Image: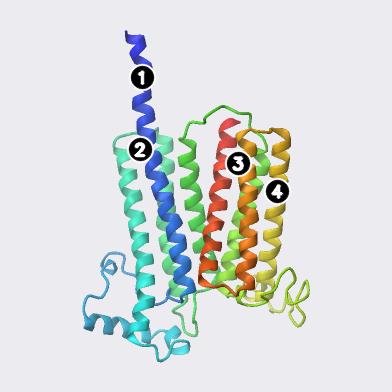
Amino acid sequence: MTIALKQPLETVSGTANHAGIRRWLWVVAALVFAMVVVGGATRLTGSGLSITEWKPITGALPPLSSASWVAEFEKYRASPQYQLLNTGMSLGEFQFIYWWEWGHRQLGRFIGLVYLAGFLVVALRRLLPWRQTAILFGMGLLLGLQGAIGWIMVASGLEPGMIAVAPVKLTLHLTFAGLFFASVIAFATSLTPPRRVEQARGQAFSWLLLALTFIQIALGGLVAGSKAGFTFNTWPLMDGALVPSGATLFAQPSFWENFVDNVALVQFNHRLGAYLLLAAALWHAFSMRGAAPGSGTARRATAIAGLTLSQAALGIVTLVLVVPLWAGLAHQALAFMVLAMVVVHLTRNSASA
């Protein structure tokens, strides 16, 4: 009788707890994904500098009276963005951009609370070994760092003469969001028992795909920050040439400034990054279908190739249509879907090794 009961009790105590942790982590991942989309909308609507102060606690409350709205508007009217770009904006127009930024910040606060609550349950009930709990703690620090980078980014846009945030700091904000998102996806996937044990294949190339995906997301952040997507809106060439006539890829005095402030080079790099990532994804899918046909590895590699191809096509549409809101948001969202699939693929391959 004791032997018969031992396995079910272990299954209930281990699998049930892990199932709850997995659900919590997937909820966090879904919230971060929503945060990325809302952040993209905040950027594309020009709303990110509408709140000129950082109040992590009291800032959770929006203006609740007419006088409060007027006071908040006066703070924005003193900002460089208003004086250089939005002079004459009405209170109603200000409220539109304010709600986007306030919603973005509220969602960030909510993600922090959901993550903290879940972590405390895991830690206090000792649902995982201490090493995994320590990893979750480190991920929480990464989430807090991401919030701090968000304010540093906003503060850069409030400097004299600025009408938008600094491209490098926007890129850091987006990239760290990707790092936290990837860590949550990887942890949740590692706790999910595989349907069947398979031999690890293409593990090194999976790491390359992850690196290329992060590089491409970072290059996309530079495109967004420098507004390079609003120039050279033709494909496959840039205004009829590989390098557009009249544009120099290294026009800035400082070599490194070109990679951030030269819109021709910023867009050129993002295009090259897309071609490299797509070629790598297609080659990986083809090689895995040949080496392990019908396996989970081959199916995941094929899914990555399909998502990457869709993302490339959507990027072309976004560019040619000069970044309409719907296309810009879809392009950013699909980038994180590609990232999620690559992380799942790599985590599964690592578990099989």
As measured in the structure, the alpha-carbon distance from the residue carrying label 4 to the one carrying label 2 is 35 Å
| Coordinates of residue 318 in the picture (x, y in percent) | 60, 69
Mark found first going from the N terminus, 4 or 2: 2
Mark found first going from the N terminus, 4 or 3: 4
As measured in the structure, the alpha-carbon distance from the residue carrying label 3 to the one carrying label 1 is 32 Å
Residue under label 1? 8
| Res. 51 in view | no
Residue under label 2? 20
As measured in the structure, the alpha-carbon distance from the residue carrying label 4 to the one carrying label 1 is 43 Å
Mark found first going from the N terminus, 3 or 2: 2
| Res. 273 in view | yes
Amino acid at pointer 3 = Arg
- Name the quadrant of the C terminus: top right
Mark found first going from the N terminus, 3 or 1: 1
Circle 1 crowding by C-alpha within 10 Å: few under 14, some 14–19, many from 20: few
As measured in the structure, the alpha-carbon distance from the residue carrying label 3 to the one carrying label 2 is 25 Å
Q: Residue at x 33, y 63 (%)?
A: 106
Amino acid at pointer 4 = Leu
Amino acid at pointer 1 = Pro
Nearer to us of marks 4 and 2 is 4
Residue under label 4? 282
Tell me if label 4 and label 3 are in contact, CB under 8 Å: no
**Residue 338 falls left or right of residue 237:** left
| Coordinates of residue 159 in the picture (x, y in percent) | 46, 80
As measured in the structure, the alpha-carbon distance from the residue carrying label 4 to the one carrying label 3 is 12 Å
Q: Residue at x 39, y 48 (%)?
A: 27
Give the structural element (helix, strand or loop) at label 1.
helix
Give the structural element (helix, strand or loop) at label 4.
helix
Mark found first going from the N terminus, 1 or 2: 1
Q: Nearer the viewer, residue 145 or 330?
A: 330
Q: Which quadrant of the figure has residue 213? A: bottom right
Mark on residue 300? Answer: 3
